[in-house]
Amino acid sequence: MSVIAPLLDALRTTIRNLGRKPITAMHPFEPRTRAPRYRQSFALLHEANGDEACIGCKKCEKICPSEVIVVGTAAKRESPATGKKRGWADDFTLDLQACIVCELCVQVCPVDAIVMVRVPNAPGFEREDLFLTMKRLYENEALPHAPAIGSSMIASHNPAPASQAQAAAPAQEPGT
Amino acid sequence: MAMSAHATAHTSQAKAAELPRVPTPAIGPRANPYLDADSFEGEGDLMVLNMGPQHPSTHGVLRLKLWLDGEVVIKAVPYLGYLHRGVEKLLEKLSYVQSTPIVDKNDYVASMTNELALVMAFEKLEGCEVPRRARYLRTICAEMQRVASHLLWLGTFALDMGGALGGGTTAFMYCLRERERILDLFEELTGARFHYHMMQIGGVRHDLPVGWDVHMKQVAADIRARIPEYESMLSANPIFRSRTKGIGRIDARLAMELGLSGPNLRACGVDFDLRRSQPYAAYDEIEVHSALAYEGDVYARYQVRVAEMYESLRIATALVDGVPAGPIMGRKPIETVNAVKPPAGEAYVAIDSPRGELGCWVVSDGSPRPYRCKLRPPSYHALAALPYLLPGTTIPDVVVILGSLDPIMGEADR
Amino acid sequence: MIGQDVAQIAHERFGLESGELGPSVPRERLLEFASALCEAGYLYLVYISAMHHPATKNGEAEVPARYTVVYRVRDLARGLEFPFRCEVPLGTGVPSVASVWAGADWQEREAYDLVGPVFEGHPDLRRIMLPEDWEGHPLHRDYAINTPHHPWR
């Protein structure tokens, strides 16, 4: 069996690949483009009228498979913007160290309060960086978030055909 | 550079020619893996070598205890459990809705198929129909996942043989490069790169983004064009052939009794594919030609896996054009933790994952948590063949045989 | 698809009725039944698993704790499957089918390790997932998930 021919063949493959564009990037120095749906960290949102959206219903705490969410429910009181009585959360912590990023909390949120966001760089360098307190979750609101929010996801899951238009809508959003 | 590579290759080729390279006979089911080491009759004593659990060639944390006579393995005993996480116990404590993202972590190279087996078992228990669009998306994901998994296998398998190929690392890097593009596709679709949580009971969680099909067909065409390059680097290489042909032969009867499945079984000449015999998802709408080889050795397993990549790319490309419109869920959306409450009963569902038959046997007592949930991991069954395959081979062949079975320890240990 | 040919064998030779879950074979005749299946062409062992049922009170009568060992075999040529099971009270062994299907060896070790039934006549019944000195069987229904144990070695 000839030894030279297959080796030359392999060498040809190598040379052909030398001319190809690399798909790797110098990551921390060159920002990496992430898909719009990329999910990495969490944020809590405010409503359009400035109220905190979370009503403290604990649905996310109950569904979390790794039990990383802890919600402190506050007493019902009037909203400063609308004057209607509604629920509030006075504490909300999320431990990213044990989070398995399954997005179930986003899916079950009835008021679209919690979303997943793309973080441009590594989420943190210390353990404390991975522990999201309520303050940090509201700070994350400024980051670009994934198009899937609770209501759009549930709408796209609805087997009724009317939901098709809604399902296709949140598709394009610029990457980070 | 070319000269030196040629020289090295030539000398090892000459050495390989000097060694008596008789193909090992296919091991039958009545071979005894429980060889008594005390009854060994030979010169000197046997040496006991622990290979693993931290060994780069054991593909995870597998420990092999080898009894050696010189370089020849007399007896091999695998020790598992270094990655045992009690997943089956965990599934009993979690609700049906919460279980899906947990099993992603079992076979971490092919997460999509883990979820698929589990949700299909739950759907069978609950008796809910999956809409056609969701079945198409599931099939496309499963087939692209198979390509990604086989690419990783091909790369690491070339790496296992390392310097002997004069290009082990090269093939590894190329394979991972192509796999990366599939992961990018999945990132675009589901938002995650490894642990997707794409499937859910009744359908899929994410619909196709705009332009995904074009992107996918581009990636599939590129990979389709490049697999021949890797094949030419490996299967034409005389060193690769002499190291894989006739090594680790397994008899079809033993393979069946051990429950080997997928590429490992089809390399023994057994034409059995769950995608054809029990079509699930959208496989009843497309013809699947499963690759087959007859020798049952390492080279046959390599051939089957490479041929499967072409076939998977063909299936995925053919399906993505015809994804029907319609809903992606067949039941009402899951909005609470106890949303799924199947009636009491039992179900077993098996799918053809990249590693073989991935099954899920689930028992329900009518509560929102499974009473018992057993996963049938193909890797566990493949590893059970090691005590039969390894005796009589040498240490370098141990690495090759183990790599050819494509075990993933996260799945075997659970 | 369930193999009707062996369902017939089970009915005629063993007097067992097989529903969707397969027949419940008495432990005395399990080995004989397994050999009959193997002779009928069911060479592929899909899995062996077990589950534990704690003692329950059914009205007046007390149902003792028991193990259910489940088997599933397949005829690859015809694509037929056949599940069957064997129920034993705690403390009673189940005959090992490792002499019929070679793959039963590791399957029974796993069932023994995690669930607990003892397989009689098994060539090498040791724990496989958990360390040798582990106490108890974690897939018992009454094994608490936070049971303290030795650190992993």
Image (tube, coloured by chain):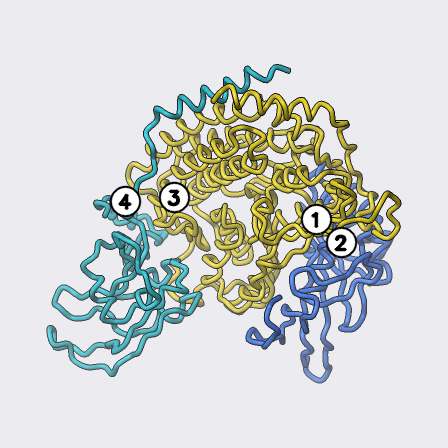
Q: Residue B186 — which label?
A: 3
Foreground residue, B195 or A122? Answer: A122
| Residue B282 visible at all | no
Is residue B363 shown left or right of residue A18? right
The reply to whether residue A159 is in sight is yes
Assign a secondary structure to mark 4: loop
Nearest the eye: C99 or B392: B392
Chain A's colour is cyan
For label 2, the SS is helix
Label 1 to label 3: alpha-carbon separation:
32 Å
Could you say which disc has been placed on residue C105 in the image?
2
Residue occupied by mark 4:
A32
Q: Amino acid at mark 4?
A: Arg
Packing grade of label 3 (10 A; few <14, some 14-19, many >=20) is many
Q: Are marks 1 and 2 in contact (CB under 8 Å)?
A: yes
Q: Which callout, 1 or 4, points to the residue nearer the camera?
A: 4
The answer to whether marks 3 and 2 mark residues whose Cβ atoms lie closer than 8 Å is no
Q: Which residue is mark 1?
A: B384
The residues bearing labels 3 and 2 have C-alpha atoms spaced at a distance of 38 Å
